[in-house]
Amino acid sequence: LNKGTDVIAEKEVIEKVLPSGVLVELPEGKTSYYLKLLDGFFLGLNFFGFVALLAGCFLIYNTMSTFANNASKEIAILKVLGETRANIIIWMLVQTFLYTIVSVVIGVFLGVVSSKTITDLVMIGAIGNTPTESISIPWDIVIKMAVIGIGVSLISSLLPAIKASKVTIIQGLSIKKFRARFNKKLVYILTIA
């Protein structure tokens, strides 16, 4: 249609020409129909994103708990040298922050590469077009997700950091404790195997 044409009047003209029973719709109607179809899809994506976020929380918590258990000797030495509980907590949170920054950079890189690869495969295989020259990266969304990821990482590692800061010098330097913990883990692993 030409610019400035009355769309509703043209729709009525087209309906008169077509046989009865043929439905003529405006593009806006189809758009809203497809958006309603996609609502369930986006709800599913949000649900699985939330599940992935929870799984990430548990993984970070377990990783930092293991790190805290393995670093008990170092923490005890830091306490002997005069470090406070607050400094030990900050030390562990800074480590988590640095690991998270590296993970975000790697994740964004892999996300961009996989997105371009999948887009090219769809364009070539399904549509028959040539691969895309470039893809649009929504940096505002990437930054929001990075901030959420960093926040979740820090919150998930806070409890292990607090527990690690409570390790006494005697507990941290006790060799017998580490051997007992290792033997228990070995027994669990052998039992499962």
Image: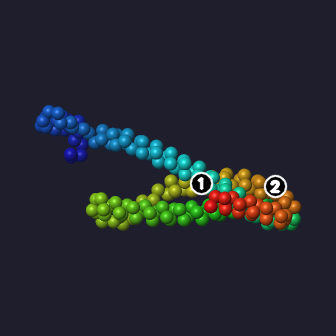
Residue labelled with disc 2: 166
Indicate the position of residue 144 as horizontal and vertical percent values: 55, 53
Q: Is residue 45 above or below residue 82?
A: above
Residue labelled with disc 1: 56
Question: Is there any visible trace of residue 29 in the rendered image?
Answer: yes
Indicate the position of residue 44 as horizontal and vertical percent values: 46, 45
Q: Give left or right: position of 79 versus 139.
A: right
Question: Is there any visible trace of residue 13 in the rendered image?
Answer: no
Which quarter of the image is occupied by the C terminus?
bottom right
Depth check: 145 or 99 in front?
A: 99
Q: Give left or right: position of 161 versus 137.
A: right
**Residue at (40, 64) in percent of width and height:** 117
Which quarter of the image is occupied by the N terminus?
top left
Q: Quadrant of residue 94?
A: bottom right
Indicate the position of residue 4 as horizontal and vertical percent values: 24, 43
Q: Give left or right: position of 72 versus 48.
A: right
- Amino acid carrying label 1: it is Gly
